[in-house]
Amino acid sequence: MKKKIHPKYMSCTVTCACGNRVETKSTVEKISVDLCSKCHPFFTGRQKIVDSAGRVEKFKKRYATKKSAPAKKSKSKE
C-alpha cells in the first residue's frame, strides 16, 4: 500500500438526538444522528413521528380542510 494516502482511523463518538452516545471507530471524530437503536420505532415498538422540517404539520394543515370525496352511486340492475 502507498503511504500517506489513507485517512486516519480514530475513535469516534456517535451522538443521537435522544442523548444516547456510542463509541466506535471512524475516519471522523464526531457524528450526530437523529435516530438510533434506542429510540427508533422499529426497535422500540412505539410510534414516533420525526419531523425536522415541519412536513407533518404541513400535511395535516393541507388535508384537514379537505372534504372527503362523495361516494359514487352504483347502478343497480333491476
Image (tube, rainbow, N blue to C red):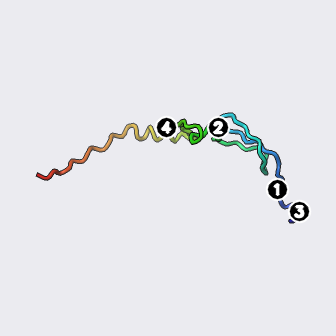
Q: Could you tell me the amino acid type at mark 2?
A: Lys
User: Which mark is in front, 1 or 2?
Assistant: 2
- Disc 3 + disc 1, Cβ < 8 Å: no
| First reached walking from the N terminus: tag 2 or tag 4 | 2
Helix, strand or loop under label 3: loop
Q: 59 and 9: which one is in front? A: 9
User: Which mark is in front, 4 or 3?
Assistant: 3
Q: Residues within 10 Å of mark 4 (few under 14, many from 20)?
A: few
Q: 19 and 64: which one is in front? A: 19
Which residue is under mark 4?
A: 57
Which residue is under mark 3?
A: 3
Residue at 32% over, 41% down: 68
In the picture, which quadrant includes the N terminus?
bottom right
| First reached walking from the N terminus: tag 4 or tag 3 | 3
- Label 3 and label 1: CA atoms lie apart by 10 Å
- Label 4 and label 1: CA atoms lie apart by 42 Å
- Label 1 and label 2: CA atoms lie apart by 30 Å
Q: List x then y, in percent, for residue 39.
A: 62, 37
- Label 3 and label 2: CA atoms lie apart by 39 Å
Q: Residues within 10 Å of mark 3 (few under 14, many from 20)?
A: few
